[in-house]
Amino acid sequence: MHYHLIGSRGSSLSGIAAMLRTEGHQVTETDATTTGHGADKLPIKLDRVIFSEAITPGSAGWPELEAARSRGVMTLRRIEFIAERMVGHTGIAVAGAHGKSTTTALIGWILTEAGEDPTVFIGAELSVFGGSARSGRGRFVVAEACEWNKQFLTLHPNVLVMTTIDREHLDTYPGGESEIIQAFHEAAMNIQPNGFIVANHDNDLVRRALIGVDRSIHWVGRSMEATYRLVSIQTRPAGELEAKLLVNGQSVELISFLVGEHHAFNLVSAFAVANVLQLDRQIVLKSITNFPGLKRRFERYREDKILTIVDDYAHHPTEIAVTITAARQRYPGIRILVVFQPHLSERTTDLF
């Protein structure tokens, strides 16, 4: 099959392009920063077009997309392509304002290490997967499900992980918190009747979004009401993150080399999914410890006695705050300089 990708340099579509080539498909691509866009960029013969969420009316890629549609070619948003891949599989979607990329990657990594050969779609690159997507032949399809443009409402997974809800993507939700909460509520109602939800009980907006949802909910967090209760989070002297939790009265210890105690919630959420799916616990714990981490998530380019340089994707005030906290935890007593590059001027203006 011949796929043509419009807006292919984004972190998500670039992974899908690599995945499709791995599967033996013919793939052509266009992007504003490399090839440019235009109707003349469309191959003469093609079967499907997958386009980025950034391709909207008025954007450089829109005429190219319209040309494909005028020829009767099937066109799919990235999230529609993922929804199609979930059909006939056990779909696991990870939603939330913060932590969803890492949690998605963790779940995909654990399933891979457990021999389940999953298909995985992440909004960031995991080097061991060769990018932001992994093609598998197993029963699981794991996907990061973003709330921007209400993409996640396209999915009807068997499992939904809800990491956090925050004031974010106010271009999509001009009504603010109430509108965001309603969208997450709809996402929860979209999961399969026999499915389950793993959700952060410490986040008040998550709890509000799940009011009235008639699905099995497995809570994680510090709360006494959490099924997977975090009893302690600390950074060891050598830098490892240690999260201790109680599961049905049993003590479990999660060890990770991810930097920052905020990752404890990502670890516990991934562990909870694996536990409900009844994966081998020893493999799960070992996988969590061996998880290599994502690109641009506290990625260290240099670390020596003179200077440490870290790159992190944090662009929301909450994320910036926890990243700075993580740096202080990992490098106590050392001077820290932060250089902030806004990701979307609108977001920076809305949340300043």
Image (spheres, rainbow, N blue to C red):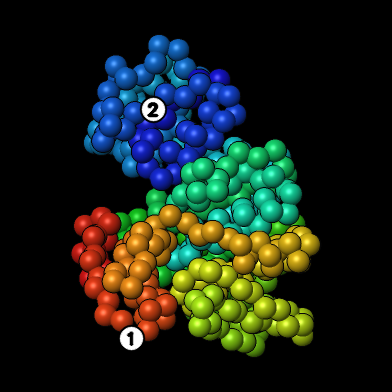
Residue 243 image offset from top left, x and y in percent: 60, 79
**Above or below: residue 260 compared with residue 135:** below
Q: Amino acid at mark 2?
A: Glu
Residue occupied by mark 2:
29
Q: Earlier in the sequence, mark 1 or mark 2?
A: 2
Give the position of the C terminus as an image quadrant.
Answer: bottom left
Image location (x, y in percent) of residue 315 = 32, 63
Q: Secondary structure at mark 1?
A: loop
Do we see residue 155 in this rendering? no
Q: In the figure, is residue 221 to the left or right of 311?
A: right
Secondary structure, mark 2, is strand
Task: Identify which residue is drawn at 36% across, 38% down.
Answer: 9
Q: Residue at position x 44%, y 39% from top? A: 13
**Camera-nearest residue between 94 and 105:** 105
> Is residue 337 found left or right of 26 in the rendered image?
left
In which quadrant of the rendered view does residue 285 lie? bottom right
Q: Which residue is pictured at 25% across the width and 55% down the height?
A: 344
Check the picture and name the quadrant holding the N terminus: top right
Q: Amino acid at mark 1?
A: Gly
x and y percentages locating residue 154 in the rendered image: 53, 46
Mark 1 neighbour density, 10 Å: few (under 14) some (14–19) many (20 or more): few
Q: Which residue is mark 1?
A: 333
For residue 44, what is the image quadrant? top left
Q: Nearer the viewer, mark 1 or mark 2?
A: 1
Left or right, 321 with reference to 196: left
